[in-house]
Image (spheres, grey):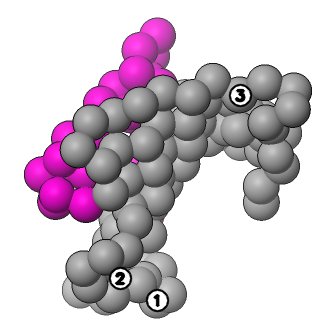
Amino acid sequence: MEAMYPKQRSRGLGSDDLYEIRPRKDRDGFDLISELFRYGPIWYAGPDAVRNAIAYAKYRAHFRSQRAIIRVLDDSGAVVEMHEWSGAFTVTRATASTCSRTS
């Protein structure tokens, strides 16, 4: 089968795994987005949707032994929370001075 995203990067060593958790446009849960997913984003719904998406991204990063960055975004695309892993996860909460708009 052919991948949905033809711009997938090679899975070489030394690259960071980037995950984004964004609210769905239909407001029905959240999408976990990464270039590593062959068939597109993973949809999470329910009261623990963000927590479950973060847990899955952490599991994948640990399993792949790669440095990972997990960004949780709000409706406007601003970073609300960021997790980084390079042996152990650290959490950074966004403040007004650290927020940056991404697209």
- 21 sits to left or right of 45: right
Few, some or many C-alpha atoms within 10 Å of disc 2 (few <14, some 14-19, many ≥20)? few
Tag of residue 3 = 2
Q: Mark 3 points at which residue?
A: 94
**In terms of secondary structure, where does tag 3 sit?**
loop
Q: Can you say which quadrant of the picture contains the N terminus?
A: bottom left
Residue 71: name its quadrant. top right
Q: Which amino acid does label 2 sit on?
A: Ala
In magenta stretch: residue 82: no
Residue in the image at 77% along x and 55% along y = 102
Picture coordinates of residue 93 (x, y %)?
63, 24
Give the vertical position of 6 relative to 37 (above or below).
below
Q: Can you say which quadrant of the picture contains the C terminus?
A: bottom right
In magenta stretch: residue 47: yes
- 24 sits to left or right of 60: right
Mark 2 or mark 3: whose residue is earlier in sequence: 2
Q: Which amino acid does label 1 sit on?
A: Pro
Q: What residue type is labelled 3?
A: Ala
